[in-house]
Amino acid sequence: MPPACVLHIDSLDIEGRGVARHDGKVFFVEGALPGELVRASVLQEKARYAQARLDQVLKPSPQRRRAPCLYADTCGGCSMQHLEPSAQVATKQRVLEDTLRRIGGVKPEQILPPLHGPEWAYRHRARLAVRAAAGVVRIGYREQGSHRIADVQSCAVLPAHVSSLLPALHAMVASLSMPQSIREIGVAAGSAATALVLHHEHALSREDIALLREFAARHGILWWLQPPSRRELHPLNPGDRDALSYALPAFGLRMPYFPTDFTQANPGLNQVMVSKALQLLDARPTDRVADFFCGLGNFSLPLAIQARQVLGVEGSRALTERAMQAAQDNHLQEKVRFATTDLFAVDAHWLRRQKRFDRVLLDPPRDGAQALCLALAGLAPGEAPERIVYVSCNPATLARDAGILAKSYRLLAAGVINMFPHTGHVESLAVFERIYTGRP
């Protein structure tokens, strides 16, 4: 039996776990909230910290609520449902501010109001784990702290039409000739079509294909197939190849994508985020702008409507080619171009070769943009962009990079984007302005 102890929870960590200090050691307790007194069992102990399981809440927080989801006790998809939504956002804001101070040694001059949207039915991208054994099919997300699949028949954060498919998906997988070969079903719900990606380890039979076609016709979805070689991703019906897209209506843009391309999982909040990022960047019609880690052009194409010229740079040639196609489809090819470069290996010399940018937008993955920030901080005043907007999905790497930029830039403002309600994920925006540099 794991040793139990009574802990007073002081705060939440970056993953949404309760943090307590006891006998000179830090304890991380999943499901505990700040201000609570809890009884917890130690699961794993190290010299300076321990991970513990919440056994009993002895004194609950006034912000604790009964988790609305039927599967909250087992499913690891949403770890913060027990906290009131407004408190979730406030917690993420504190995590962002604390991380900027602790890692980057910086403090924003202004805290931006948080960007948030609906707390349910927001997630248009997901990966559902699948396991079929002994005649039983499980479909869902991993259980908390486990590789076991929490079997779900509905999911409140998925769009309603996708959540309602889950019972039928169970039955469909069970009816395949080799259900045990299905390991994952990806979800990509676009503006006008919804695709499901079937990850299968063995070839599908003719009967399996017929079942998939019948399922697609009955439920109004598109199937994409991904055999073990991930390079072979393809739609079941070739005519569905260009059916997926999302909209940026404020800019009159349609953005096509493939179901495994990176797009924001929360398309409604993505629209708000793009508009806010462009407002903060404040690009003028005469400006030359760079969008680094541009992906499919989520920011590049809206920027091309506002600025004189935009360069989008991304590490994947497939993404930059599709971004250029989107620019052509939206009649923006004269104002934007795309380049493929490893942005984790660039330096100030490379940046100078691109010629001066008036504004820069950064939207890196979780690893951040350390090399780019070092390059930007190393530019002379006449070479450097006046303003940088940094869109982050990891406050730790944002803080590190903000500390680098602080040598040459002021951190004007920062704030959170609640892109994933009920999770500990912290998305954020930060705005930097060149020190002693004004507009010409």
Image: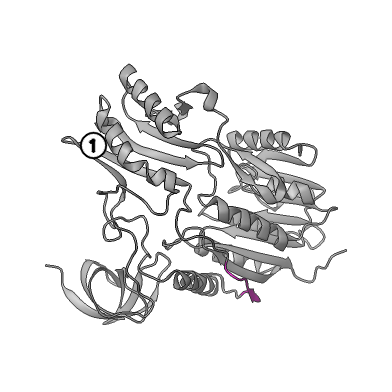
Magenta-colored stretch includes residue 113: yes
Residue under the point 59% across and 68% down: 415
Q: Is residue 170 above or below residue 408?
A: above
The quadrant of the rendering that contains the N terminus is bottom left
Image spot of residue 139 (x, y percent):
30, 43
Seen as rendered, the residue at the extreme top is 206
Image spot of residue 434 (x, y percent):
75, 66
The quadrant of the rendering that contains the C terminus is bottom right
Residues shaded magenta: 108-114
Seen as rendered, the residue at the extreme right is 440
- Residue 378 visible somewhere in the drawing: no
Q: Is residue 369 above or below residue 32?
A: above
Q: Is residue 384 above or below residue 206?
A: below
The one nearer the camera, 422 or 48, is 422
Corner quadrant of residue 107: bottom right
Residue under the point 40% across and 24% down: 213
User: What's the magenta bit mostly, secondary-structure-wise?
Assistant: loop
Left or right of residue 201: residue 217:
right
Q: Is residue 159 above or below residue 222?
A: below
Magenta-colored stretch includes residue 386: no
Corner quadrant of residue 321: top right
Q: Which residue is mark 1?
A: 132
The one nearer the camera, 28 or 224, is 224
Amino acid type, callout 1:
Ala
Residue under the point 51% across and 58% down: 419
Image spot of residue 258 (x, y percent):
53, 35
Residue under the point 36% across and 51% down: 155
